[in-house]
Amino acid sequence: MSQKYRLESGGLIDRNKKLSFTFDGKTYTGYHGDTLASALLANGVRLLGRSFKYHRPRGLIAAGSEEPNALMQLENGAYTEPNTRATCIELYDGLVATSQNRWPNLEHDFGAVNSAVARFLPAGFYYKTFMWPASLWMTYEKFIRKAAGLGVSPTKPDPDVYHSRYDHCDVLVIGAGPAGLAAASTAAASGARVVVVDEQSQPGGSMLGSKQSDQYSQWQENTVASLTQSANVRMLPRTTLTGYFDYNYLTAVEKVTDHLGPGRGGDKPRQRFWKIRAKQVIIAAGSIERPLVFADNDRPGVMLANAVDTYINRYGVIPGKDIVVFTNNDSAYQTAINAAAHGATVTVVDTRKSISEALQASLKTADVRLFKGHAISSVQGSKGIHSVRVMELSADGKSVGGQAWQIDCEIVANSGGWTPSVHMFSQSGGKLHYDKNIEGFVPDTSKAKRINPNFSVGACNGKFSTKDCLAEGVKAGSDAAAACGFTAAPGSLPSVDDDGMGHIEPLWLVPTVHPVGEGSAKHFHDFQNDVTAADIHLAAREGYLSVEHLKRYTTTGMATDQGKTSNLNALAIMAEIRGAQIPEVGTTTFRPPFTPLTFGAIGGQESGELFLQERHTPMHASHVANGAVFEDVGDWKRPWYYPQAGEDMHAAVQRESYAVRQSVGILDASTLGKIDIQGEDAAEFLEMIYTNNWKKLGVGRCRYGLMLNEHGMIFDDGVTTRLADDHFHMTTTTGGAARVLGWLEEWLQTEWPDMNVYCTSVTEQWAVAALNGPRARELLSSVSDIDCSNDAFPFMSMREGTIAGIPARVYRISFTGELAYEINVPARYGKKLWDTLLEAGKPFDLCQYGTETMHVVRAEKGFIIVGQDTDGTVTPLDMDMDWIVSKTKADFLGKRSFMRSDTSQEGRPQFVGLLTKDPQVVLPEGAHIVAEVKDAPPMQTLGHVTSSYMSPNVGRSIALGLLRNGLNRKGDTVTLRLMNGDVIEAEVTDPVFIDQAGERTRG
Amino acid sequence: MFIINCPYCGERDQTEFTCHGEAHIARPKETENLTDEQWGEYIFFRTNPKGMHYERWVHAHGCRRWFNALRNTATDEIFATYEVGAPKPPAPEKHS
Amino acid sequence: MAEQTPARISALSGHIIPGHHGVEGSGVTIKEVPDLMLWQMAAWADTVDRAASQVAQQSGMGSVPGFAAATGNHQRALLRIEPLKFWVFGASVSSESSDQSVVLDLSHSRTHLRLTGDNATDLLNSYMPIDLRERSFPVNSVASTAFHHVGVTLWRSDAGFELFIPRGFALSLWELLQDAALQYGLTVEP
């Protein structure tokens, strides 16, 4: 019969909606409202996976996100996702799950041999064994990764869409259990903006898995309804808080459509990543039941007591018909009574000798047998349990003795107490203190980080009774609202009288007839990382006493689990070994994420095509239509070259470069940085920014300028034009535009605030088409009302006019050494300008050219590109540009550094031309000029090639570079040694290869 | 991820800002009269405290104004933000 | 000007597809407002009051907004984008600088989108780390911030959110907006 462990009635499931799913290829059914875990349990499937290291059979331990064992490979193909917790997967029709870490299958796993040789796989095994030789680590690693493999990553692109967003609120409430709901409703009633995140599909927290009074149920229903309807409240179900960062910046993942099944979300994202900034945070994250550490406590069927309760109450599933409840505190009695009430045969084994009369009486009423002062000394069965042995505990709890009672059972429901979920408080930078009453760490609010104002309420604060949870929630809700400037009037609360965990007597390690580490039994405290009490003993023997060492040596508390069920047990066992108190051992730092999250969610919608923003010039559509191949320059998409039919890049660039010097070329120069500089002190300001003089520049005139940083190194360059006495138009390199604007503003605001100057980027305001070549004037004159004669419009000047009716500023400046005009028009006219010029240019053999040709032709003239021919270690003198450095100005940025011993020394790398002996050889950029060729590096380097091209206009290869003492070495032959071993000789020359007199550009 | 109280815009997200190191370092006057040591002190040397630090920030993606902040580099608590040119606010004696 | 200037071409030309996109319903409506007219006026600490009053009067605003605020409406407004810097929206300013202030035409430098609808804040918060709740960002609030690493300016006018994007980035940011809007139901107005 299917679902034979499903109860006849009860639970928050919809029995009218039957769902079909497969696990390891076998088909099962469950109901809407099930998790994959509850549905498997209903079908009696208890063996769900193999453990990480020993490949031991494992089943469910928990019902929530603390589950360490039941990690599933969910779905196939592109949708597959490894290591998903069966307890957190809402069942949908057609779900496909596969167990992990086993081969060939779950029942027969070869890796289980690890278990037989477990004595050879102790803590630190990998460190010890694979340490040497280091060169072999890469070899070892492959095998280790395979052997230790959990799930399998998808190999296809992620087909899902994700969304990431910011949100702001006054009060963020983490957890929608009693404490969280009380806090949220109190804060919300004050008018504060409240966000409530909760990892479950519906609010209620622990109460979803518990029996509730009618009064409480009514209160919860009303509270949730009111919160859901409030305009100032955002309820986020299926949302896990993943990280708590400074200034109350918290991240959460909302599983928006995961529960519908893969590919069924439509236009909604699969998951949403919330980046929430909260004025106040209320942590109501609850607590996690911790297992008792007893012999073979990892057998499938050993579960946490509250998980058994939750499966019964929330999912209508009884995990087994014969149940042993094993506990050291009162809370598990509720499980025993509940299970018995649902037809199970139940035995309670309590490690305590003294138990309250009321509890004993309640067991009697429920017909549950009780062993006081006893412990489970062994568990029988491997892929499932068939019985346990129970023996009497010694007074000190260190040994067992007397008669061994054998009790047949399928399920052991155990409770070692409750651990407050302090992860979020810990992530916020808060410190913890140990509360002996509850045997657990709780937030020490006196040691919270001040920039992260928060409250911990309810079970995560060590308050386990519902009454305390509600009271703390109301108080925090009110206080948090008040801190945001709102006044809260607490509403009415239901009366509840459970007492949470009740009394606890810790027993951190349950003894067996053998000492720990001897015999075949294993006492696990960390199921996910497969770490046992014996490993802690070993770590202690080998000196790894501090908690941080213990963690790394044994791997306890690591990975996706983050010590949810294991942390305190590990600390306590170490404390016992050291004879220390638990707080003396310390706590580890809990790290984000609380539970694993997908990279997809973090990336959000900004992935794939949308990952990197692109910047387009106003002429972009024309370039696309004209077949340009684009180059990325910063964010800009710039035409690189315009291949014609049958041309490769080399052919296209040679043709374009030739055309620029033979007829006329047109370049989209819109990307050049453009900065509008205005104010009465503008000229004075430029005097400080540039190395040369600006005060006497005439209106309408242009000048080339070099900017240095305070180290005297070249920082940027460009042409600046005086538009009016107090108004300049500066151009910068494409890549340096933002940096230069920031640089100008920095100096104006921080050093010279008395200067009346404003700098504004106008890069986006102007579209720029640069005409270069001997026929540029003819072309411009044919479309413009500007007098372009050499006298009326000389080199290095600007004229305003119209081009085909478009208002334009035309700058006669040149980056090619040819007659050239840079035509600036307002951006929305840019495409029209381009298309007009292309058409009008036909009679003049106008040729579109891209950035590669721009590089070639400027190199023919020895024009530098800052950032390519310079690298931040180069002064103007190194570049043989002392003609641009004013000798008369008292000061400018970087000037003083010229006098530094290093900058002024002889023989620094200096800018030269390089001509290879073989004119057909194009040197690779970056190639080193060496003092002496050797077979292999190291070789003393004298400099390197910064630019290198085949030049159609010079008729041979040309190169530029930096060479030690290069200015004095012109005519020398130097040797370059390439990466592939080739040796090339080149002559050191002047860097200007064409028109050294500069006549073409002025003509 | 900090919240930074821009003296002009109020509290805004750290992504809008960039930090530019130690504040209150004035560019020397008459630089040609400085020794190499004095000039070197200005261009190369900065403090790097664990604790209170006066530093320069710019609201690059906001109002583009430069300002100074007093921040504890160990806890990232920002005790004050103030306009360029304003005097250093005193560091609190006790701070977390 | 001697000749009639040719038609202006938007950075989004050919990329705006009017109609409904994404899930049912219309959570967000986006419209590109064409032919933006935007002038900048920057004054000095000792002249800002006079210069601002003057420009407010010229542009017909009457009153001068405080920092990070605007006066006017979605057709014509004065935005104070920095303590001493203003944007005149929907009108031009005499381009002659005075000793009180400097002015600059930025009309072509930005693409102007108007976002309206119940989910407009959700959409903007997909990219902007700004608290856009009515209480924190009421009508006529102005903020410059980062949108996918790009500096943009947002103004809440009487008509909705007015977003000014550097022209070169307009297409990329438009694609990002459109993508994130599908989940809310997007209406693109012609």
Image (cartoon, coloured by chain):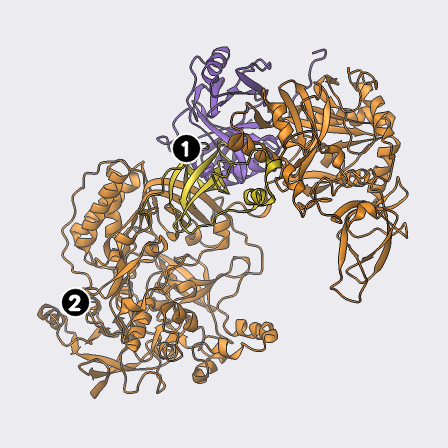
Amino acid type indicated by mark 2:
His
- Chain corresponding to purple in the figure: C
Answer left or right for C127 relative to A186: right
Q: Which residue is mark 1?
A: C118
Q: Nearer the viewer, mark 2 or mark 1?
A: 2
Is A782 rendered above or below residue A773?
A: above
* Chain B tint in image: yellow
Q: Which mark is residue A242?
A: none
Of A956 and A423, nearer the camera is: A956
Of C157 and A446, nearer the camera is: A446
Task: Tell me the CA gap for discs 2 and 1.
Answer: 52 Å
Q: Which residue is mark 2?
A: A503
- C-beta proximity under 8 Å, tags 2 and 1: no
- Chain corresponding to orange in the figure: A
Tell me the crowding category of disc 1: few under 14, some 14 to 19, or many 20 or more residues within 10 angstroms, Cα based.
few
* Residue positioned 34% across, 58% down in the render: A423
Amino acid type indicated by mark 1:
Asp
Is A540 rendered above or below residue B94?
A: below
Residue B19 in the image: state x and y as whole percent. Answer: 49, 42
- Element class at badge 1: loop
